[in-house]
Amino acid sequence: MASISDRMRDALNGQIGAEIHSSHLYLAMSAYFQSLDLAGSAHWMRVQAAEENVHVQKLFDFVVERGGRVILDAIARPPAEWESPQACFEAALEHERMISGRINNLINLARQDGDHASESFLRWFVDEQVEEEASVDRIIKMFRIGGGQPVALLMLDRELAARVLSPAAVAAVTASAAPQQGA
Ligand code: OFO
């Protein structure tokens, strides 16, 4: 297997930075919900931040496996406040749509390079983005149905408290933590 191209390595390093920023952003959103005493929403965002860390690790491992060097960049400061809990989830959806666009661009780059390994690897992220966008979209719809009523907000917050790390993320962490045999 040929080493990764310089431009694909740089693009994946850029994505590692974007995923670290995602984790940072969701941790900031968690702190925002904590400040509103919405513990379920704060928990949901903490789990989301953990999922983003899994994305970071997957990309990190892939760059190394392909003979590339991981270079980290500074992390931009995330906002601390949003207009409302619903606005915060809407910002999360907008962010995920931006990330989906980045993943699509990475796949286009892999195709231009004839880099089948990178294209195959990135498909996991395509599927992950579909799930992430759908789950945030569903939460926003529930906010709309609740119409800003405090009771509806508390019920939704209670539901969000039940979120656990996705099976795909757990599998990715387990695979990443296992020592490589015979490498
Ligand atoms: Fe939210 O999927 Fe990574 O960034």
Image (spheres, helix red, strand yellow):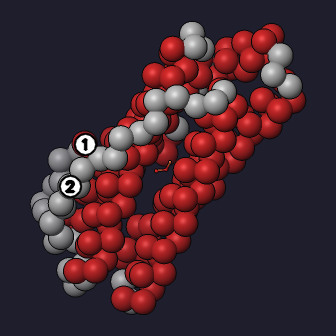
Left or right: where 92 falls relative to 56: right
* Viewer-side residue, 4 vs 140: 140
The C terminus: image quadrant: bottom left
Residue positioned 61% across, 34% down in the render: 88
User: What amino acid type should be assigned to the residue bearing mark 2?
Assistant: Leu
- What is the spatial separation of the Cα atoms under label 2 and label 1, in whole angstroms? 20 Å
Q: Is residue 142 above or below residue 41?
A: below
Asked which quadrant contains residue 67, the reply is bottom left
User: What amino acid type should be assigned to the residue bearing mark 1?
Assistant: Ala
Residue 168, x across and y down, in percent: 49, 45
* Viewer-side residue, 75 vs 173: 75
Residue 177 numbered mark, or none: 1
Left or right: where 124 falls relative to 41: left
Residue 152, x across and y down, in percent: 80, 16
Residue 79, x across and y down, in percent: 46, 36
Q: Nearer the viewer, mark 2 or mark 1?
A: 2
Residue 124, x across and y down, in percent: 49, 60
Residue picked out by circle 2: 72
The N terminus: image quadrant: bottom left
